[in-house]
Amino acid sequence: MDIKRVATDAVTETIVMTVVQMDYKGQVAKRINEKMPLATVKGFRKGAVPKDLVEKQYGKAIKQEEVQKVVDLALERFVQSERLNLLGTPLAKVNEDFSWDTEELVFEYEIGLVPNFELDLEAKNDIVKYVVSADDKLIEGQVERIQKQFGKAIPQDAVVAGSDLTGTFTNEEKGINNTTTIALDMFKDKATADKFIGKKVGDVVTVNTKDLFEDVHQLMDVLKVSHDEVHELAVDVDFTIEAVNTTEMAELNQELFDKLFGAGTVASLEELKAKIKEDAESQFAQQADQKLLADVQDFLIENTKFDLPSEFLKKWLQTVGEKKLSPEEAEVEYARSERGLRFQLIEGRAMATSDIKVTFEDLKTFTTKSIRQQMAQFGQTNPTDEEVQGIVARVLSNQDEVKRLSDQVVGEKMLELFKEKANPTTKEVTYDEFIAASYGE
């Protein structure tokens, strides 16, 4: 057999395989001999069919099967021996003039190659690493929300200033139908809040979504609409009142502190505020890290130039998956996934050049930390090592979980690498300023 590579461009090649009789003749003969005792041809007893008739009836199909086995194995070994780094899998090229009767059978496979490119993680950039602080306004607001959450709801016959309303927002045209609880002081305009004063359970109040709240993102919560939709949304929505309550605020005492954080963790209002600040800034740090990672990804994708075997990948996308894609569908899918593929290649190059690996100990440490955090959220603040490690062992016995957790560990390692190499500018901001920077608002 003769195998060679023919370059189309820097990232696309064709593997040409020429198969001759000696590559498959012996295996075909063996299969014919095995078939003879089982062959059935009209006019002959089973097992007594002449060999030439067996070859005539079954020979072509057997030849095709055996040649395909030879080709598949040779292709696999060739890719390995040439150390080809492929995108997708080889695609057989259709040859309208192909004939199984020729002495030499020529098969062609198109392949897409991972491109070669230079990666500069230390390139000059304007990336910002945000350090988000919890200011007094945010902390006071959280204290008030805690008092309200653990306070006593007092049913009212009609809406008064300070009421909390449970009800359903609806707009049939936009597909809005969401039950939620709102406070009158959430509305940006006092005139909007005044529309509800005096209303009772069962009444319907119509409001417009434009400038309904001080923070437009609150619409995402109360209407369950996406971030992309919310900025363009300016429609009337009906709010059907289902319950009216005022709240007797919970007293800030030791019983409430223990209920929130466990016995003895917090003992005063000052300690409560400090705990709120600590927890909030821990969450903000995670959000800031995610923004940093996204910003670095965008920068590297835009500034790391390389060609992809795009036409090959579009054809390949038509052949994979349970549902075969049309050329038009493959075009859309490729456009949707191209940036992700580019970053996947960049990430792989960064891991290779920085010798980043994920070990079992990395996985075990990460999973242990995650399990402890999850248990703490459900009030189990001091689980034993034996309890935690038992859960960790069960989690890591699931291959799907191992894959998911491995991706998260890689994300953490890459984030640390980017922080070091990209050298972003550090900027301290409030949470409101961070949101404005994140969404450009």
Image (cartoon, helix red, strand yellow):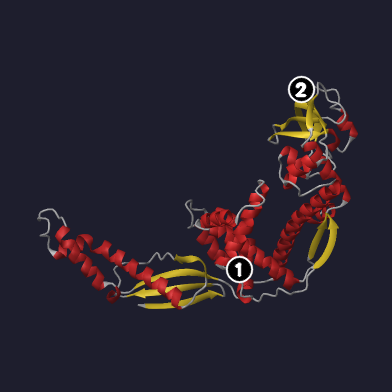
Circles 2 and 1: CB distance less than 8 Å? no
Mark 2 surroundings within 10 Å by alpha-carbon count, few (fewer than 14), some (14 through 19), many (20 or more) = some
Q: Is residue 427 left or right of residue 329?
A: right
Q: Quadrant of residue 223?
A: top right
What percent of the width, then of the height, locates residue 113? Answer: 54, 71
Q: Residue at x 84, y 51 (%)?
A: 432
Q: How many marks?
A: 2
Q: Residue 328, can we see it?
A: no
The mark lying in front, picked from 2 and 1, is 2
Q: Is residue 57 left or right of residue 140?
A: left
Determine which residue is flagged by label 1: 345
Determine which residue is flagged by label 2: 201
Taking depth in this image into account, of 370 and 108 the one nearest to the observer is 370
Q: Residue at x 16, y 58 (%)?
A: 38
Identify which amino acid the numbered label 1 is placed on.
Answer: Leu
- Decide which of tag 2 and tag 1 comes sooner along the chain: 2
What percent of the width, then of the height, locates residue 345? Answer: 61, 68
Mark 1 surroundings within 10 Å by alpha-carbon count, few (fewer than 14), some (14 through 19), many (20 or more) = some
Q: Quadrant of residue 160?
A: top right
Label placed on residue 142: none
Q: Residue at x 78, y 73 (%)?
A: 124
Could you give the CA–CA distance between mark 2 and mark 1, rounded to whole angstroms?
58 Å
Q: Relative to 245, does residue 378 appear above or below in the rendering?
A: below
Determine whether the residue tagged by mark 2 lies in a helix, strand or loop: loop
Q: Residue at x 15, y 55 (%)?
A: 40
